Image (cartoon, rainbow, N blue to C red):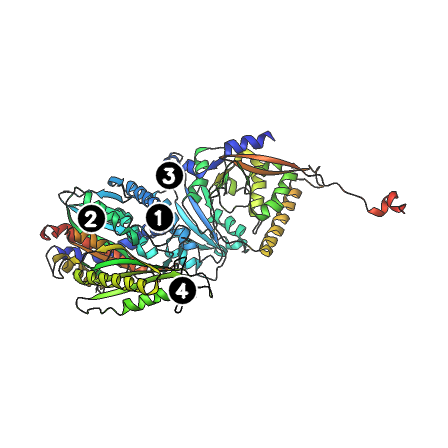
Amino acid sequence: MHNIESWLENNTFHHSQWWNILALIEEKKRKNLKISLCIPTFNEEATIGKEVIIFRSELMERYPLLDEIAVIDSGSTDKTCEIARSFGADVYFSGDILPEEGHHKGKGENLWKSVYQLKGDIICYVDADIRNIHARFCYGLIAPLLYRDEIKYVKAFYDRPLAYSHGKRRSGGGRVTEILIRPLFSLFFPELTALIQPLSGEYAVRREVLESIPFPTGYGVETSHLLDVYNKWGLEALAQTDLDQRIHRNQPNHALGKMAFGILQTFLNRMKAYGLTPLPEITPFLRQFEAQEDHYHQILHEIQEEERPPMNELSAYQNRA
Amino acid sequence: MTPVLTPILEALNDHQAALHAIQEILLANTVLFSEIPAPTFREKQRIRFLLDRFTEEGLENVSRDEVDNGIGILPGTEGKNNILIVAHVDTPFDAATDHTVSVSAETLQGPSIGDNTLGLAAIASLPTMLKQLDVKLKNNLILMGSSQSLGRGDLQGLRFFLDNNTRPIQAGVCVEGVHLGRLSYSALGMFRGNITCEIPDDYDWTRFGAQGAIDILAHVISSIQQIPLPRDPRTSILFGSISGGTGYNAPPSTARLCFEVRSEDAQTVNSIHQKITDITTRITEETEVNIHFDTLAQRAPGGIPYAHPLVKTTRQIMEALEIKARIAPSSGELAALISKEIPSVTVGLTTGIHINEHDETIQIKPIFKGITQLIALLQAIDQEGGNYA
């Protein structure tokens, strides 16, 4: 698919392209933009302090790229809020924002409430469980929005192995991405397979997008965002930045099962909303990706799931000796 | 109290509060430095980050020298003299160690976070903190991350700098992350040694009394412990680590002891060195195994007197901040400065536990008192350092 190859070439970045944070700040000033960082949390006391310290020091005090750092919390029972507040983040309980709209527990709810609460023209979302946090997790996502007006939504992916011998390497996402999302996208929205890690929790988005799309309150929020942005503005509105390594806690299979269930619900709801039911013609191509140095290429796998009839319908079977 | 010190002490409370307001700068530097491995002789990456910070702060002469020290100069308003502030960059942890730092409301935890990443981060953050406090020094401040300090490094980084530096240094301050209250103004005579015990290939295991390498090394240790140590001058032998063997029931063929001898008296150090040489020679002959005694680092004792104005000023600053001074001689960077007769002290910045272990932990709150102390000390040296000679 030609569009995927050209999109990979033009809309896929590496954070090192944006090392000059002073230039980003100039561009931000020139465009008179405000930028907010939102960290959605629920019991993240082990990692939240470090994130707030690094972002405040590097992207507010030292290089004022961010105008606010906010933690939107779902009701943590540990010290998440206390720690975040002690290091200078603005901390909000999600239920206190737009109380007349009620309160749902979940990451998507926090993100939705952040659109109301935060002031930024761009909001950058970063998950709170990253152990190797660095300023690039923010500026790497914000930068494409500062330089390219047509880009509206920048997604993170993580693709730098510490060592790789040579040549091509298989590139892709986590277990839920490879087992659920990539097959679904390959079947129904092939262009979206170009996103190496569609479920990554880090992305920067223009307010005009955030205020005009619905938010599932739980696991499906990343999937629905991609589908809605793609449906409304096309692939060109999306971009992705390689942020190298991301070290975080690994989810057990049963937690991934819940996540997959939520995502599948969202996906089917979107199919219905876009009028794609009954199901359109199903293509036999699974799209995966490989990386060669800085370039990404799709690999097309034709997987024909032919179906055999019950053996007892075969006359040969019925007549066998 | 000297008239110079009065306004400096009066500003301590305000300084402490103002430093707390920009805590993220120092804490973020501590986290970022700490997550860059820097085993002795492999400090390049950490120095690179230090130099980036120095450049961002607009320091002059930002450079890495041939032994990988990182240096930058904050020019003084008059620039007639130079004050050196130094923290060692290297750590005892190898690059494969998980260097991830965790942060709670009260603590930072990670390998080397206190010894000496906090000290290094303080030096990297100092220009910002001085700016925040509107403190301008009249003399040049040479900020330095010194490499090759620990173990076999034997202070090579700082020694190289002092041997080759062309700017006269009025006074030196060595910064250690832990412990707040530390005050060192003298260096101990010291040597570090390894004793390796190797069973030769043709060793007769069937003969009466045949022993594995650990047994023989234990015999060496026991003999060293018999060496009488004088109380005055104060002298000690520290057994730092021991290694050897692979399991439970196989006699090990090699074993190694790492140790340090310290004394306030150079003659005593030399005498103990000779006695340990005699012990290893004797046991080699008795056991017919190869025992190697290898000296890695050696320092002469020395320092400035307790009544020196630099020590007196440091104590007064600590007293004003209600920091209980714990006077202890140093075997670190201070020794190199003392050997060049540069009046110097070592101070610590905060409290910590499990130092040099993987779960090394430091307290956040005392850091700002420690930094306030450090800045007041620099201000005092800046004002009265001309009288130190």
Identify the mark at residue B212; answer none if there is no mark: 4
- The Cα atoms of the two marked residues, 4 and 3, are separated by 61 Å
**Is residue A239 in view from this perspective?**
yes
Identify the mark at residue A57; answer none if there is no mark: 1
Asked if the residues shown at circle 1 and circle 4 are in contact, with their CB atoms under 8 angstroms apart, the answer is: no
User: Picture coordinates of residue A12 (x, y %)?
Assistant: 50, 35
Judging from the image, what secondary structure is the residue with disc 3 in? helix
Asked if the residues shown at circle 3 and circle 2 are in contact, with their CB atoms under 8 angstroms apart, the answer is: no
Q: Amino acid at mark 2?
A: Leu
Circle nearer the viewer, 4 or 3: 4
Asked if the residues shown at circle 4 and circle 2 are in contact, with their CB atoms under 8 angstroms apart, the answer is: no
Question: Do discs 4 and 3 belong to a common subunit?
Answer: no
Left-right relation of A116 to B84: right
Q: Amino acid at mark 4?
A: Gly
- Labels 3 and 1: the sequence-earlier one: 3
Question: Do discs 4 and 2 belong to a common subunit?
Answer: yes
Circle nearer the viewer, 4 or 2: 4
Tell me the quarter of the image containing the N terminus of chain B: bottom left
Identify the mark at residue A144; answer none if there is no mark: none
The residue carrying mark 3 is A21
Question: Do discs 1 and 4 belong to a common subunit?
Answer: no
The residue carrying mark 2 is B84
